Image: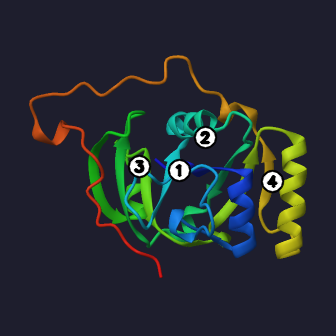
Amino acid sequence: MSKNWYIVTNTEDLTDFINYGLIFDEQGFTGSGPVVNMTKDIPKGYISCFSTDNLSPALEKIKTEDENLDCCLLELDIKKISSFTAYGGFMQGNNIIYSQKQGCIQDLEGLEDINCILIPAPLPFICIKSIIVEDDNTKKKIQVAYKEKFGEKNISFKKTVSLFKIPNNKGQLIESSDSESDIGEEWKVEQTDID
């Protein structure tokens, strides 16, 4: 079963991604770094992508850092990066990972026990299918910045408020069993320095 996959960010960091034509981890930012470091809980050199049913923890993280930030989602065009080797797992809101696997994105993205994929950074901006925001004003600002850099619109801009709603129940934790494979852990991925 195919899922939609998103990079969760904010409009300030998105402006940097647009200006460089790349989506990168914290190593790609100059000066003080990203406004919200969405990659500090994952190995260096990777970008985390979340399935639709796992957006809440990342959105909460942005709002915790600065409630005035405008969140946005970058929907990935999986077909453009399907052969990339990546890491997938089932991520809980507390950054605990279950069922870690390595493989091609096309093999990982449809698995039921995968709701977070780590993709090697940087990613070219052309892998983005759409930019999704919460309000029309933010959408207009991002469209202008995108058009100034890339000219023709080759991705869609959407306002989809429902994706930004954080549920009250925040999901249920996986119940652990006696099996060693069911024990949650941190990502087991070798960190990568980007030159």
Indicate whether 153 appears above or below 195.
above
Q: Residue at x 60, y 38 (%)?
A: 65
Coloring applied to the structure: rainbow
Q: Earlier in the sequence, mark 4 or mark 2?
A: 2
Residue 71, image x, y percentages: 70, 43
Q: Which residue is mark 4?
A: 157
Q: Which residue is mark 2?
A: 62
| Relative horizontal placement of residue 54, taking residue 163 as reference (left or right) | left
Q: Earlier in the sequence, mark 3 or mark 4?
A: 3
Q: Nearer the viewer, mark 3 or mark 4?
A: 3
Check disc 2: other Cα within 10 Å, few if <14, some if 14-19, many if 20+: many
Q: Which residue is mark 1?
A: 38
Q: Earlier in the sequence, mark 1 or mark 4?
A: 1
Check disc 4: other Cα within 10 Å, few if <14, some if 14-19, many if 20+: some
Residue at mark 1 to residue at mark 3: CA–CA distance: 7 Å
Residue type, mark 3 in image: Asp
Check disc 1: other Cα within 10 Å, few if <14, some if 14-19, many if 20+: many
Q: Nearer the viewer, mark 1 or mark 4?
A: 1
Q: Residue at x 51, y 35 (%)?
A: 57
Q: Which residue is mark 3?
A: 41
Q: Earlier in the sequence, mark 2 or mark 3?
A: 3
Residue type, mark 1 in image: Met
Q: Which of 85 and 63 lies nearest the eye of the viewer? A: 63
What element does badge 4 sit on?
strand
Q: Residue at x 36, y 54 (%)?
A: 88
Q: Which of 14 and 89 lies nearest the eye of the viewer? A: 14
Indicate whether 23 appears above or below 179.
below
Residue at mark 2 to residue at mark 3: CA–CA distance: 13 Å
Residue type, mark 2 in image: Ile
What element does badge 2 sit on?
helix
